[in-house]
Image (cartoon, grey):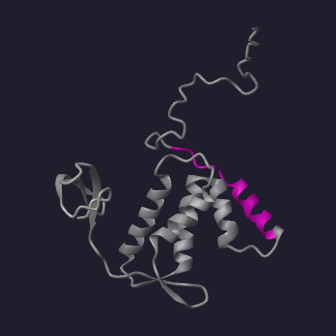
């Protein structure tokens, strides 16, 4: 294993732990002494995505992650939420046990998870994924979402604002700044 810092070819394993889909190894370079993490995963057969136009393309986790990041840009989401969604979808696709999956299946998986995670991100993704022909169809989709009850976070989910302990000020009661004289 090459060190990502100095490029030296030798490292030693300090710690190994089982993770969801493989083994996480903490390593230390024998040359520079810096530490880094590697993941060892089972390589499954290639998963192919059948696009709308009939083309086949190998499943690309990074492409899915990029699309989710765009939809969730500037949204107050918990750290790692987008990565968890990608891992869930990739795991579910592998469990299907099929060599080819229609892109529509992946799109529906993403929309289902985004609807529960963040409704604004859901609408952003849906606007591109559904390729609304006009504003009326888009408006109907937003109105339909507005009629559904919003998902409430459970006690097991981390708070979006972990430092919010009830000590925040109500809206419109901002602290006034004193003018400094001098």
User: Residue most toward the bottom?
Assistant: 54
What is the span of residues highlighted in magenta in the rendered image?
Answer: 136-153
The part of the image, by quadrant, that contains residue 68 is: bottom right
Q: Is 130 above or below relative to 36?
A: below
Image coords of residue 112 (percent x, y): 56, 63
Q: Is 65 above or below relative to 32?
A: below
Q: Is residue 77 left or right of residue 27?
A: right
Image coords of residue 2 (percent x, y): 26, 64
Picture mark count: 0
Question: Which residue is at the front of the view, 148 or 133?
Answer: 133
Residue at x 59% of width, y 58% of height: 115
Q: Is residue 125 left or right of residue 63?
A: right
Does residue 60 belong to the magenta stretch?
no
Residue at x 68% of width, y 70% of height: 128
Q: Is 181 above or below relative to 70?
A: above
Question: Which residue is at the front of the view, 107 or 6?
Answer: 6
Q: Is residue 75 left or right of residue 29?
A: right
The part of the image, by quadrant, that contains residue 129 is: bottom right
Residue at x 75% of width, y 73% of height: 132
Image coords of residue 95 (percent x, y): 36, 73
Q: Is residue 141 left or right of residue 113?
A: right
User: Can you say which quadrant of the picture contains the C terminus?
Assistant: top right
User: Can you say which quadrant of the picture contains the N terminus?
Assistant: bottom left
Image coords of residue 104 (percent x, y): 57, 78
Residue at x 76% of width, y 13% of height: 179
Name the magenta segment's main secondary structure.
helix
Does residue 149 belong to the magenta stretch?
yes
Question: Which residue is at the front of the view, 172 or 16?
Answer: 16
């Amino acid at each position: 294993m090459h060190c990502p810092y100095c490029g030296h070819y030798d490292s030693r394993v300090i710690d190994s732990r089982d993770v969801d889909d493989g083994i996480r190894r903490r390593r230390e370079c024998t040359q520079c002494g810096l530490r880094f993490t590697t993941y060892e995963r089972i390589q499954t057969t290639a998963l192919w995505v059948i696009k709308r136009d009939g083309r086949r393309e190998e499943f690309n986790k990074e492409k899915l992650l990029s699309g989710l990041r765009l939809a969730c840009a500037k949204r107050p989401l918990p750290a790692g939420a987008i990565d968890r969604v990608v891992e869930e979808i990739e795991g579910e696709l592998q469990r299907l046990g099929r060599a080819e999956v229609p892109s529509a299946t992946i799109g529906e998986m993403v929309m289902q998870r985004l609807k529960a995670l963040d409704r604004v991100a859901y609408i952003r993704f849906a606007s591109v994924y559904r390729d609304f022909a006009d504003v009326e169809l888009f408006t109907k989709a937003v109105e339909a979402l507005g009629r559904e009850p919003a998902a409430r976070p459970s006690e097991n989910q981390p708070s979006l604002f972990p430092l919010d302990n009830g000590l925040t000020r109500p809206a419109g009661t901002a602290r006034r700044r004193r003018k400094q004289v001098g």
